Image (cartoon, rainbow, N blue to C red):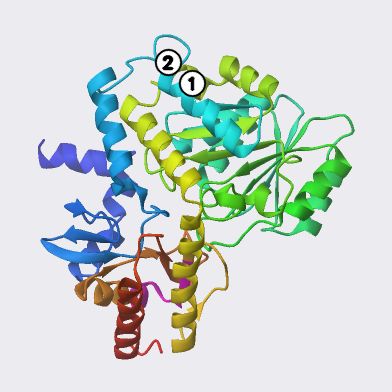
Amino acid sequence: MDNTQSTTKALGLFKKCYEFTRADEVKAAGIYPYFRPIEESEGPVVSMEGRPVVMAGSNNYLGLTTHPEVKEAAIKALEKYGSSCSGSRYLTGTIDLHIELETELAAFMGKEAALLFSTGYQTGQGVIAPLVGRGDYILSDKDNHASIVTGNLRAKGMNVNVLRYNHNDMDSLERRLKQTEEGAGKLIVTDGVFSTFGNIADLGGLNELAQHYGAQVLVDDAHAFGVIGEGGRGTASEFNIADQVDMTMCTFSKTLASLGGFVVGEERVINYLKHHSSALIFSASPTPASVASALAALKVLQRQPELVNKLAYNADKVRKGLTELGFHVLPGRTAIVPVIIGDDTKAFRLWKGLYDAGIFVNVFISPATPPGKAMMRNSFMASHEDEHLDYVIDTYAKVGRELGII
């Protein structure tokens, strides 16, 4: 391509691509924290750039991605079924492992049926859009995950009314419910544990409003499954209303140590989704190894519910340690420990100091957070030991003081 062609492209559709230089500037400063390759993983410690690094930013909440039973299940499934199902669940892409995992998930969550999707992101789109129609309403928390937002946008294109309510604000939700028309279908959608700040939805209050106004409830438990609730059964279990919440959806990519997603609910609802969800019908089904891994991880969770308590202990230890040092740590009781830094560059420099010392955490900046609220999103695993956690706390103290944050 000559310079004339390149200039023409730069002035057209791709103009914004050429003008985006923020990432290049951060890279040039040596503090770019994204797309760092992991070369080997043993759970709480990974290899990056040829050296051991304590992983304090993974969503592998129970540490099961390296569990021997999970890895062995994946290997056996690969040997038996091959690498892919080569079709959608609707046609040639269903194997007996899909049915087995759906049965086990429904039983674990106390629901009539379950349905698997190929990714957690697809699950939000694959559940929301088919359930609503022209004139219906979706009421969605403003801090919901991007998968829900995408599902809402698709529904909006079908002349569905999408009303967003203020984050975890039940008064705001009720005001929105009062705006809905009598007799219209209403679906309230919320994260169970919100993925950025780790706080828990007021599902008790939300469920009361849903019952009063005749709405159905869909909870995304991506960051709640295996983390809160009885034996890790999620947000509805945490509030002791599992029998009242209509549907719970989730991903495999966190507690279940794999790739995929699922929704549980009434058999008639799940049956409808099986025949109307384009995200299911037009996607290749979850691979045998992915399904086998998730099934094995679920069995470990059922056999070792104490892992949920170990995870809570680990996250709380770091939460308390960093708070006592003087960091601005948001309160909570999930695996996510957010540390508010404020300035983007200072957050990147803190990340670099931690990384150079052998700790990896995630940096969230706008638009993932509100402007001026850059944060370190720490997340912990049940497989972290006290030595890992102490090192994280001590290193935060050292680097935080060097940068004048504490």
Q: Does the magenta-highlighted stretch encompass residue 55?
A: no
Q: Amino acid at mark 1?
A: Ile
Magenta segment? 337-347
Crowding near pointer 2: few (<14 within 10 Å), some, many (20+)?
A: some
Residue drawn at 25 percent across, 39 percent down: 9
Q: Does the magenta-highlighted stretch encompass residue 341?
A: yes
> Distance from label 2 to label 1 (Cα)?
8 Å
Instruction: Confirm whether residue 157 shows in the render.
Output: no
Q: Amino acid at mark 2?
A: Thr
Instruction: Confirm whether residue 233 shows in the render.
Output: yes
Circle 2 residue: 94
Residue drawn at 55 percent across, 50 percent down: 232
Where residue 353 appears, as percent x and y from the top left, is: 25, 77
Where residue 179 appears, as percent x and y from the top left, is: 84, 44
Q: Quadrant of the C terminus?
A: bottom left
Q: Is residue 131 above or below residue 31?
A: above
Residue drawn at 44 percent across, 70 percent down: 375
Q: Secondary structure at mark 2?
A: loop
Q: Nearer the viewer, mark 2 or mark 1?
A: 1
Circle 1 residue: 99
Q: Quadrant of residue 253?
A: top left
Q: Is residue 100 above or below residue 220?
A: above
Sequence order check, earlier mark of 2 and 1? 2
Q: Is residue 200 above or below residue 296?
A: below
Where residue 180 appears, as percent x and y from the top left, is: 83, 39
Residue located farthest toward the top when viewing the structure as drawn: 91
The numbered dot on residue 56 is none
Q: Secondary structure at mark 1?
A: helix
